Image: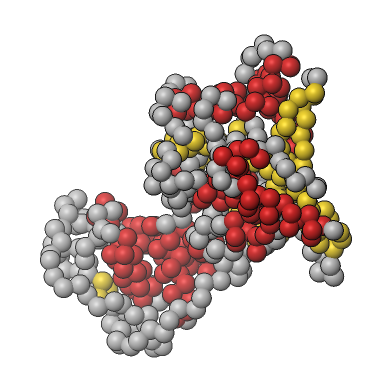
């Protein structure tokens, strides 16, 4: 069979081109499977299960959180070891994923029959799926990655796996065979983007093929086994209209955000970890004109822009010798030479904020970025601190003048204590009075209490400003009537 190991003397049997065997079925009750006796000087043993050809009922739905017994894991370990001894991984690598999965299922079915493991059809189907995932995918993580309602997957060693669903963290019944299997899967994930994780390089940031963000920290830094954290992206990308239905922003507030993205305001999205900054940034990029050239700079490429003219750049960590590192600041500087119309920085966390501000102030209107901070005012203070971290010995007033001349709008996102995510402020950077940066809130989120289920109740309110600081920019793009209508509607609602 194609994919099996060769003869015992080291030679490899060339696969014959013949019709593929029928898909093996799970053994019916009482059915047995025997190993065909091997003649002297014969080739490799041929597994010949004797099973009646019956239809296999569909497998039960995968239940990622069901606890499995130690017997299941012991059986799986034995079958997996026998599979590795039987299969030729170099030949398997030449097959497409579907064919490779069928080949593995064939061999595992044979192993189960030969070793006379007693299990139901559903248990056998579950075991087949798990082993295919171990060999070809991300092992026990596959059922969790397939679920679209999970926001985060947190693996704390081989035995403890947590997920976040609807803003709440809960433990699952998923576990790994041992810490080595967990580390192997982590290495498989990070190797896809040309990175590594081992004792010499125990911390690594990477991404999955769908853009989901991955962080791995391995022993000896992680004492209780490898810690893996995955920030999952939904298969269907969220839009501003959808997050409006979730209550993250009111419909009129969403209209103001659409206008802000359309009229090329320079935007910073501020918020804490897990508050939805990247999701909101993705939503706002939908309102960029499709004929604009957009360049994104990220530590791990997770932005998913819909425009046709997008150039995606990603930082690179140093190699084993400590050389070859490409920082976010290098990317931002370089993209200035690439004729961008908008520059989008996935996350501003260091001295690159100065280069981004310079870009915003030199003709790249409509540039965007995200930053970690808990309020619009704190966001401004953090930018000053980051500029100081870069070694710039500029007077404080000069730094603030650069910020005021560059940033138009700060959008504050927050994750509330009930797990919900809300846009709490839409704030304009207006100017300076003396040495103080002046801001004004256009929209704020007011909490009113909580319901019987513990969900927080609040409302997005207008602050009564009918003519924002970017009014002339909106007029230039012909959006002043839409802006006036949205602000007036919010003000009436507040009354």
215 horizontally vs 485: left or right: left
Colour scheme of the rendered structure: secondary structure
**The quarter of the displayed image where residue 49 is located:** bottom left
455 w.r.t. 93: above or below: below
Comparing 430 with 350, the one in front is 430
Give the quadrant of the N terminus.
bottom left
One can see residue 195 in this view: no
11 w.r.t. 432: above or below: below
- Residue found 25% across the figure and 78% down from its top: 22
Comparing 117 with 127, the one in front is 127
Marker count (numbered): 0
Residue 261 in the image: state x and y as whole percent. 57, 45
**The quarter of the displayed image where residue 244 is located:** bottom right
Residue 272 in the image: state x and y as whole percent. 70, 43
Residue 52 in the image: state x and y as whole percent. 30, 87
Residue 270 in the image: state x and y as whole percent. 68, 40
270 horizontally vs 219: left or right: right
- Residue found 49% across the figure and 78% down from its top: 60
- Residue found 71% across the figure and 41% down from its top: 468
378 horizontally vs 124: left or right: right
1 w.r.t. 191: above or below: below
One can see residue 462 in this view: yes
Give the quadrant of the C terminus.
bottom right
- Residue found 63% across the figure and 37% down from its top: 472
Comparing 133 with 2, the one in front is 133
Query: In the image as oriented, which residue stretches furthest toward the right?
Result: 449
């Amino acid at each position: 069979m194609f994919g099996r190991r060769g003869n015992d003397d080291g030679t490899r049997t060339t696969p014959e081109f013949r019709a593929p065997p029928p898909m093996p079925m799970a053994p019916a009750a009482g059915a047995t499977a025997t190993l065909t006796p091997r003649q002297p000087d014969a080739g490799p043993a041929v597994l010949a299960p004797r099973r009646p050809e019956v239809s296999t009922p569909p497998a039960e739905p995968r239940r990622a959180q069901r606890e499995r017994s130690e017997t299941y894991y012991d059986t799986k370990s034995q079958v997996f070891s026998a599979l590795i001894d039987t299969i030729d991984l170099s030949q398997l690598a030449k097959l497409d994923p579907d064919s490779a999965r069928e080949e593995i299922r064939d061999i595992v079915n044979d192993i189960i029959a030969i070793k006379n493991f007693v299990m139901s059809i559903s248990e056998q189907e579950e075991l087949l799926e798990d082993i295919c995932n171990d060999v070809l995918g991300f092992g026990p993580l596959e059922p969790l990655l397939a679920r679209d309602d999970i926001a985060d997957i947190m693996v704390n060693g081989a035995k403890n796996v947590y997920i976040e669903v609807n803003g709440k963290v809960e433990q699952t019944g998923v576990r790994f065979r041992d810490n080595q299997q967990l580390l192997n899967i982590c290495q498989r994930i990070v190797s896809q983007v040309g990175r590594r994780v081992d004792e010499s390089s125990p911390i690594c940031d990477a991404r999955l093929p769908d853009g989901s963000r991955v962080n791995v920290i391995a022993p000896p830094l992680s004492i209780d086994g490898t810690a893996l954290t995955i920030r999952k992206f939904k298969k269907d990308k969220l839009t501003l209209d959808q997050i409006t239905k979730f209550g993250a922003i009111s419909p009129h507030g969403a209209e103001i955000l659409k206008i802000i993205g359309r009229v090329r305001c320079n935007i910073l999205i501020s918020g804490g970890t897990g508050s939805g900054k990247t999701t909101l940034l993705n939503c706002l990029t939908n309102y960029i004109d499709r004929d604009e050239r957009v360049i994104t700079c990220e530590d791990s490429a997770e932005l998913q822009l819909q425009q046709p003219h997008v150039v995606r750049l990603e930082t690179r960590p140093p190699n084993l010798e400590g050389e070859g590192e490409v920082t976010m600041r290098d990317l931002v500087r370089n993209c200035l030479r690439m004729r961008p119309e908008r520059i989008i920085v996935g996350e501003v966390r260091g001295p690159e904020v100065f280069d981004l501000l310079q870009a915003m102030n030199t003709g790249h209107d409509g540039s965007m970025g995200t930053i970690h901070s808990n309020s619009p005012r704190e966001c401004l203070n953090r930018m000053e601190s980051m500029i100081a971290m870069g070694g710039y010995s500029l007077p404080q007033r000069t730094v603030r003048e650069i910020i005021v001349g560059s940033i138009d709008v700060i959008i504050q996102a927050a994750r509330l204590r009930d797990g919900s995510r809300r846009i709490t402020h839409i704030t304009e950077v207006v100017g300076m009075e003396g040495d103080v940066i002046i801001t004004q809130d256009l929209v704020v989120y007011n909490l009113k209490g909580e319901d019987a289920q513990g969900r927080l109740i609040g409302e997005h309110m207008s602050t009564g400003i009918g003519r924002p600081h970017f009014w002339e920019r909106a007029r230039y793009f012909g959006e002043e009537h839409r802006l006036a209508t949205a602000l007036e509607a919010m003000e009436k609602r507040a009354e």
